[in-house]
Image (cartoon, rainbow, N blue to C red):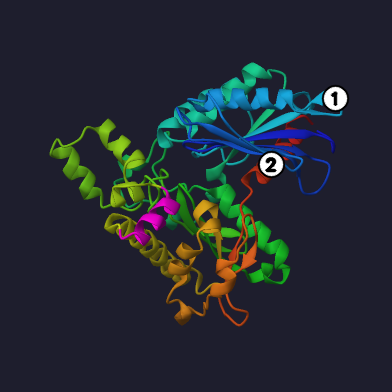
Amino acid sequence: MNSNDNILVFNSGSSSLKFQLFEMNATIPASRVRGVVRNLGDDAICEWAYRGKREHTSVSAYDHGTAARYVLELLEHITDAGQSLLHTITAMGHRIVHGGDTFTAPILLTSRALTALDALSPLAPLHNPPALAVVRACQEHLPDIPMAAVFDTAFFHELPDYVRAYALPAEWIEGSRPIRRYGFHGLAHRYMVEHFSTIHPTNTPSSRLITLQLGHGCSVAALRDGHPLETSMGFTPLEGLIMATRPGDVDIGVVLHLLEGGEVTASELSEGLNHRAGLLGLSGASADMKELLALEARGHSGAHLAIEAFCHRARKYLGAYLVVLGGADAILFGGGIGEHAPEIRARICAGLSWCGLELDRQANEAVAPDGEERISTADSRLAAYVIPVNEEALIAQDTRRCLSTALV
């Protein structure tokens, strides 16, 4: 690959599909088109921007595959100097959530690799199957374009053994798919750490960071010198913080009780834990933090409970990771909630003066959309920042490196 490549990136979420087309003629990829297909199903919409122009349209996209085909058709109809943007694409990169122990670095997507990735789908049922559907839709539409997969789990591949291990019987955890903690949101945590090191290079040699990726899915990581020492998600993306529709940490005895009592089947349990727990389950009203804050302001007790539990769980992990790191230099907030909900950031940071964090409430409230901002006071010993996460830029960079190596 060369310096004038255009790489299209797809980032599959559980109910959305983000995309960006990058021009790779600089150290930092330059975004030409960016957008997202949200609310896949009957109410799907596509929001996209090109050269300052923003569009918002309803689309027929019932699943990730049809959403990807819509995006490719969209790019075919956008022209630059008389040329369709679709025909400028020289490579594609795809985010795959779970790479297991097999995939610990970006790979060229071949039929053999896709077969191996299909086998991992049960470990991330909300994410891997949709992402692979996007890959296959792209291969059908653009069969001659090379494609790479970049894995969320790769960043946490070198977690210490005592962090990766579950205290289970040995015969359960050994086998072709070892049961251990993999960690997720690796691209988001990696982006925050790498971006922080560019704006604070003096901190890089001994940086102790806690990164919070708070969105539909949520996780927190503890990192020293850019390397993860702990993270909240484990074997699947169900562990850790309370999320939109996932519960985070749950006593496994609850699962046994439900199964043994016949209240639910295994498939019903999986559906409930992935789609009806978390903020939605606690509030009984919504999985969306913005909606919950509005409901709480109107006195909705379920919304208040969900928000308080969400912030308490995040604060509990922050305290634990301060111990893991022996203190921290900064806390970094990213993700849809982390970047756009100042009230939630304030509640998570409340009462942390004991560890040196003093929140600048005016700065916290004034963070612009997609803006990077220090939200702690100038004399705070523990700094706090909002770092807008651009996973797609990392995927583009990793895709270029992967394909360049593969083509040598």
Distance, label 2 to label 1, CA atoms, is 30 Å
User: Residue lying furthest front in this view?
Assistant: 298
Let me know if residue 18 appears in the view.
no
Helix, strand or loop: magenta stretch:
helix
At numbered mark 1, what does the secondary structure look like: helix, strand or loop? Answer: loop
Image quadrant occupied by the C terminus:
top right
- The magenta region covers 288-299
Left or right: 203 in relation to 338: right
In the figure, 167 relative to 177: above or below?
below
Q: Residue 365: x percent and y percent?
A: 55, 67
Question: Where 46 sits versus 393, above or below?
Answer: above
Residue 340 position in % (x across, y down): 54, 57
Residue 398 disc label: 2
Instruction: Please give left or right for residue 247 compared with residue 88 in the image.
Output: left
- Measuring from the top left, give residue 150's x and y in whole percent: 61, 38
Residue 33's quadrant in the figure? top right
